[in-house]
Image (cartoon, rainbow, N blue to C red):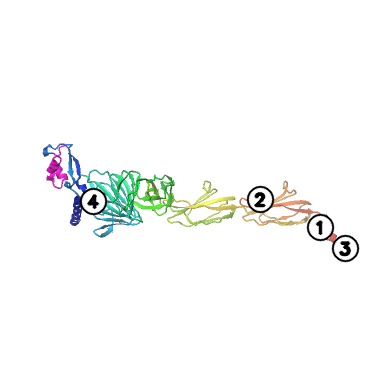
């Protein structure tokens, strides 16, 4: 510390001695066994030889009569004092310190002194520790000025006073003991005086004359130029400059998580909690440590859920609290989780929605960042409890030649890398259908001894065609059963009579699906079905 800065600090403290009745208070000290008066003077007093005045003040006539257990009242202005040290425990994001009108980045090596100002940028924060081990977290887009940083020698008393001009602070303050121990946060509209507690102070973003004070443990006295107000644990208050602060309002309880995993293989990190009917929104804070010292994000959400897509692989702590109609933020719900580095879900899935049984299936999708491979899954149900295909893939396009029986299928894909398998994509539907049954063309009647070709329509993916000839329509008695590679059959050497023919395509999942039967006759020459004889008879009838 420079001499100029030390003199400035001493001057400010001297001014405080003269202007504040605080310094007329006494610090109480209990004498230890075998402790001499001069020893106490050397240890605690600015001028050790003024211990005689202290003894007279306590109506002790002779130093030798000082005994163990005696409680001495020592005025604060007799005590040693000096600038209190402030440590920077953590810095996240863009945080600056302005000292002697010079702006520099704040680091954990920075020296914070009286009159300095700390400014945090968006999504930035810093945690600082005072000489009495109290800690203060300065949130995003905040400005804090240090007005008093005094340590009363070896008494353990520390006087810390600061001004929050904008943004928010959260304090974890050690129990303060002694009249010289203070911890105060001043805002443009009020002063929060803390004595051993956990609290939050926040300046309204749109109106700096409005301050929110919330106490999660202990008590805080909130005072403005109108009236003081004691805020107990679990309550908060809203203060506006020139107006009496609202009576303490009970804070909304901590939300209960309904969806929160301990480990997330990949982004997004999705969390949900029970909605509070009295909440107008929720505050979500993310920390890079379980002690909640390194805040990396703070955001407001309207719904009772959040999906985090913009955090890196690592371990995190998260806090959620409800916000009431007054703007007060409630009790914290805490959750700890770990995010692994598996790929995000693939997008832009593409495939045919309808295919025929036996048709080659083609699948394609977009490549997410960091994916080294993929897992393709096909299931008979949307919940993927009945998986029929689980296949690893090296690229974003896969062709399956497996034959699928008719029905509806769901498919999805996940990215993989050295960190594991990520979340699967949204599923898509494929409907596998059978080809239509064959259709036999008209079969002419034939004369005994002649032959005729019977034709059927070609069926996709048919390997062969199974023909059946019967004399009854129900095909209870099969006369001929024949297989052809082509969709045609040559009939010959049939005896006289009525016949029925049908055909089935033999292919994937297509067995025994016969066409409608066709009827035809095989007749003897001269039985009235000879075309020549029929035409001659018709000419005779016309002549008559």
First along the sequence among labels 1 and 4: 4
| Secondary structure beneath label 3 | helix
Q: Is residue 152 visible?
A: no
First along the sequence among labels 2 and 4: 4
356 left or right of 184? Answer: right
Observer-nearest residue: 511 or 187?
A: 187
Q: Quadrant of the N terminus?
A: bottom left
Residue 530 is labelled as 1
Observer-nearest residue: 472 or 86?
A: 86
- Please tell me how crowded label 4 is: few (under 14), some (14-19), or many (20+) other residues with Cα within 10 Å: many
Image position, residue 289 (x, y; %): 34, 48
45 left or right of 267? Answer: left
Q: Mark 2 and mark 3: span between their CA atoms?
A: 51 Å
Residue bearing the label numbered 3: 543
First along the sequence among labels 2 and 1: 2
What residue span does the magenta drawing correspond to? 33-59
405 left or right of 315? Answer: right
| Secondary structure beneath label 4 | strand
Q: Which is more foreground, mark 4 or mark 3?
A: 4
Residue 149 is labelled as 4
| Secondary structure beneath label 1 | loop
350 left or right of 5? Answer: right
First along the sequence among labels 1 and 3: 1
Give residue 485's quadrant in the image: bottom right
| Secondary structure beneath label 2 | loop
Q: Quadrant of the C terminus?
A: bottom right
Magenta segment includes 39 = yes
Q: Is residue 130 above or below residue 104?
A: above
Residue bearing the label numbered 2: 513
Q: Which is more foreground, mark 2 or mark 1?
A: 2
């Amino acid at each position: 510390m420079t001499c100029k800065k030390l003199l400035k600090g001493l001057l400010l403290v001297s001014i405080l001695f003269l202007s504040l009745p605080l310094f007329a208070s006494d610090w109480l000290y209990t004498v230890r066994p075998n402790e001499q008066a001069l020893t106490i003077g050397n240890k605690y007093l600015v001028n050790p030889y003024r211990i005689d005045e202290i003894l007279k003040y306590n109506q002790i006539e002779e130093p030798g009569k000082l005994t163990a257990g005696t409680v001495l009242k020592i005025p604060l202005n007799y005590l040693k004092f000096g600038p209190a040290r402030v440590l920077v425990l953590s810095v996240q994001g863009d945080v600056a310190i302005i000292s002697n009108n010079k702006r520099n980045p704040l680091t954990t090596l920075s020296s914070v002194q009286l009159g300095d100002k700390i400014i945090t940028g968006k999504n930035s924060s810093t945690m600082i520790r005072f000489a009495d081990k109290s800690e203060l977290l300065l949130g995003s887009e905040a400005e804090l000025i240090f007005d008093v940083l005094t340590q009363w020698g070896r008494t353990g008393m520390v006087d810390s006073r600061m001004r929050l001009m904008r943004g928010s602070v959260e304090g974890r303050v050690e129990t303060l003991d002694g009249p010289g121990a203070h911890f105060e946060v001043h805002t443009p509209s009020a002063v929060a005086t803390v004595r051993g507690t956990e609290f939050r102070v926040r300046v309204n973003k749109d109106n700096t004359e409005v301050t929110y004070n919330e106490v999660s443990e202990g008590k805080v006295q909130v005072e403005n130029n109108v009236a003081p107000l004691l805020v107990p644990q679990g309550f908060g208050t809203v203060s506006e400059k020139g107006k009496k602060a609202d009576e303490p309002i009970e804070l909304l309880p901590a939300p209960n998580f309904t969806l929160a995993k301990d480990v997330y293989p990949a982004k997004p990190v999705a969390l949900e909690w029970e909605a509070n009917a009295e909440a107008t929104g929720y505050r979500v804070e993310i920390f890079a440590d379980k002690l909640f010292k390194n805040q990396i994000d703070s955001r407001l959400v309207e719904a009772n859920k959040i999906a985090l897509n913009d955090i890196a692989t690592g371990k995190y702590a998260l806090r959620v609290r409800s916000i009431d109609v007054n703007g007060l933020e409630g009790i914290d719900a805490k959750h700890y989780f770990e995010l692994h580095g598996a790929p995000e879900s693939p997008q832009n899935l593409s495939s045919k929605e309808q295919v025929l049984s036996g048709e080659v299936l083609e699948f394609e999708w977009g490549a997410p960042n960091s994916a080294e491979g993929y897992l393709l899954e096909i299931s008979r149900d949307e919940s993927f409890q009945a998986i029929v295909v689980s296949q690893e893939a090296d690229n974003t396009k896969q062709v399956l030649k497996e034959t699928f029986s008719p029905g509806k299928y769901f498919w999805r894909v996940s990215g993989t890398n050295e960190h594991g398998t990520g979340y699967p994509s949204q599923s898509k539907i494929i409907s596998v259908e059978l080809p239509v049954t064959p259709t036999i063309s008209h079969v002419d009647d034939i004369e005994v001894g002649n032959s005729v070709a019977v034709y059927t329509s070609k069926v996709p993916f048919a390997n062969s065609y199974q023909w059946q000839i019967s004399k009854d329509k129900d095909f209870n008695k099969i006369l001929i059963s024949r297989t052809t590679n082509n969709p045609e059959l040559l009939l010959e050497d049939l005896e006289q009579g009525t016949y029925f023919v049908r055909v089935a395509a033999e292919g994937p999942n297509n067995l025994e699906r016969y066409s409608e039967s066709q009827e035809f006759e095989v007749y003897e020459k001269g039985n009235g079905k000879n075309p020549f004889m029929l035409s001659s008879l018709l000419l005779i009838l016309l002549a008559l």
